[in-house]
Amino acid sequence: MISDRLRPLGESIFAKYTALAIKHGAVNLSQGFPDFDGPADAKAAAIGAINAGHAQYAPMTGVPPLREAIAHAWAMRGNRPINPDTDVTVTAGCSEAIVAAMLGFLNPGDEVVIFEPFFDFYAAGAAMTGATARYVPLRAPAREGEAFGFDERELRAAFGPRTRAIIVNTPHNPTGKVFTREELEVVADLCRRHDAVAITDEVYEHLTFDPALPHIHLSQLDGMAERTITLSSLGKTFSLTGWKVGWAIAPPALGACVRAAHQYLTFSGATPLQHGAVVPIRDHLCRPGGGEYVAGLRSLFIRNRDALAAALKAAGLRVHRSDSTYFLMADHTPVSSRLGLADDHAFCEHLTREIGVAAIPPSVFYSRKELGRPLVRFAFCKRADTIDEACRRLSKLGADAQ
């Protein structure tokens, strides 16, 4: 009974592996959400908003104090000043912003360029709009210490007369890649040449780990401010993923596209949570480096990444570099070949059932499944003791593969 456009997308891989983790008592490193709470001042502000009677619909574009805080934080990061009334739209998380931007801007028959592996909402958004996705692979590095990267020739070949947009996710889920200025200049050049719009998913913008690889807004490059829809959210930066407070920043003509769809998808998000979101944005993101909470989160994640990488290497996996996000990608084939496991799905099911650690098979994030079959994705956005327990269990994987 499912529609033809959505049937090929199938069941959410996150729901499947979270359920499998619960069934087998596994440490759940599959789904990207923290197992700890967000900052106390944000929670207090949301509770205060409830007690103050903020119980009715928010304005469609978002409550004014939140739009003003988003605009101020944007300018504090060296971006051009924006008008909170015309350039900011608050959405029900970045997930809704992605779909609203695609539905509001793309028409059936348009082409949209998407890097793979991809966050699955991009493929779903293309299916909903009737646009054709043109995929460009971010290939796993051949040498240790290098990052995933794209072939400029493949990216240029993906653009054509029907290209209307490109989706750029930086920092990138699931690879942990931070796009360099040189890479973004290639994207910007193609957008200008083909009169295409960039839809950028930047939810991990504050969670970069190497000062030599800072996050760069594509909209800052020459000629891109007027042709970029920048998407982000509160959830990843402040460990409040369930609040579902996201936003789109765009010039009025492109912002109108987002709002045209947003008004009929959710119209508005939870009013008290929007008021609560003002405090962490105002009191943290308007400070250098994102403030004390974000700095602490960044330190925890670097610690967790390094501990998990060491455990995976000891177990026999080839671990790829991660410079941001919640995620670490590794090549499982050295272990799977010794255990007789055929692909990433078989490896992740074995890992969950027999080792007690749940991860995600990333071939689901590729149009060409063969590119993802050698890989596995782990989430390290957890308490230190959760990661340490996962590392302890992973030691059994290395012993089994001897």
Image (tube, grey):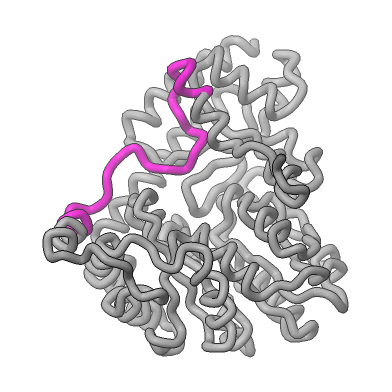
Indicate whether 144 appears above or below 339: below
Q: Residue at x 79, y 85 (%)?
A: 193
Any magenta on residue 293?
Answer: no
Left or right, residue 183 beside residue 63: right
Q: Examine the structure image and report whether residue 43 is included in the region drawn in magenta.
A: yes
Q: Is residue 353 visible?
A: yes
Q: Quadrant of residue 58?
A: bottom left
Looking at the picture, tell me which residue is in the foreground, 229 or 8: 8
Give the farthest residue toward the front: 1
Return the x and y of residue 273 as percentages of the image width and height: 28, 60
- 331 or 257: which is nearer to us? 257
User: Residue 155, position in %: x, y?
Assistant: 80, 66
Residue depicted at 63% across the width and 66% down the height: 168
Q: What is the magenta range?
A: 20-44
Residue at 59 percent of width and 70 percent of height: 101
Q: Is residue 275 above or below residue 331?
A: below
